Image (cartoon, rainbow, N blue to C red):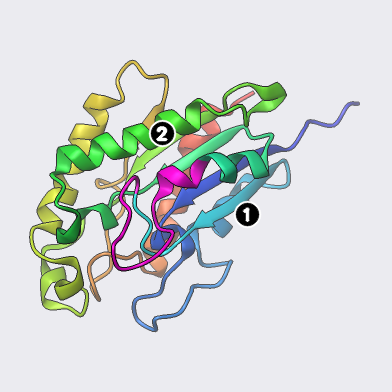
Amino acid sequence: MKQALTKTIVCFGDSNTWGYNAETGSRFDEKTRWTGLLASDLGSSYRVIEEGLSGRTSVCEDPLFEGLSGISYIHPCLMSHSPLDLVVIMLGTNDTKDRFGLTSFNIAQGIVRLARKAKATEAGIGGQPPEVLVIAPPPIGEKYIDTAVGKPMGTQCSVKSLELADHLAQLLQGTGIHFADSKEHVAMNEVDYMHLDTEGHLIMAKFIRDRVANILKG
């Protein structure tokens, strides 16, 4: 009996894909991160590749830190891991920072631009485009402004992140790009209100697993 081919998934995101632990300032281990849990849940017929980077934006060049714009990295990233079956993109949290001056609609436009670029690569099987799934991250909690991240993030970040999903859903219609909104399922922690805690990673893994299984079924 012929063995099924392994399906490859790239998870492209920011510190919540990298696995930042806001309580310790370190990284959650592989068994705690949602990407590691996703790989375990999906089993040996899937290969899950982590491409998380703290501070990553969809399209903005950060004036304070180097190399954080996803749009300039997505193509070589996907081609280096090809052939791919699916690209999961979860960004938008860092794009809410005051210093980028974007509205929630602008942030959605940037994420859609990034997703379209991923969809246009030849990183899929046989040089075809891979499937792309955009995840709207959980909104930033209002109390973030009173934590250590408040000053570097600036004001209105929680408002913009709360509005993001609706704009993404509208802009992704008819693109052939899959979309899922996590806010009714997953919440940020109660430390800085903009990162996943241990439970959040567990719930996120289950949330994304169900979407991945549906997209790649058969």
**Between residues 109 and 194, which one lies in front from this camera angle?**
109
- Residue 110 % position (x, y): 29, 39
| Residue extending furthest toward the top | 174
Quadrant for residue 172, please give it: top left
- Residue 136 % position (x, y): 30, 43
- Our reading of the magenta stretch's main secondary structure is loop
- Residue 176 % position (x, y): 42, 19
Instruction: Give left or right: position of 116 versus 149.
Output: right
Where does the C terminus fall, quadrant-wise?
top right
- Residue 14 % position (x, y): 40, 57
Instruction: Give left or right: position of 156 versus 91.
Output: left
In the rendered image, which residue does mark 1 sit on?
40
Q: What residue is at 8 percent from the left and 58 percent from the top?
A: 156
Q: What residue is at 36 percent from the left and 69 percent from the top?
A: 197
In the rendered image, residue 67 lying in the magenta stretch gets the answer yes
Residue 55 vs 127, above or below: the answer is: below
The residues colored magenta run 58-74
Quadrant for residue 126, please give it: top right
In the rendered image, which residue does mark 2 sit on?
115
Between marks 1 and 2, how big is the CA–CA gap? 26 Å
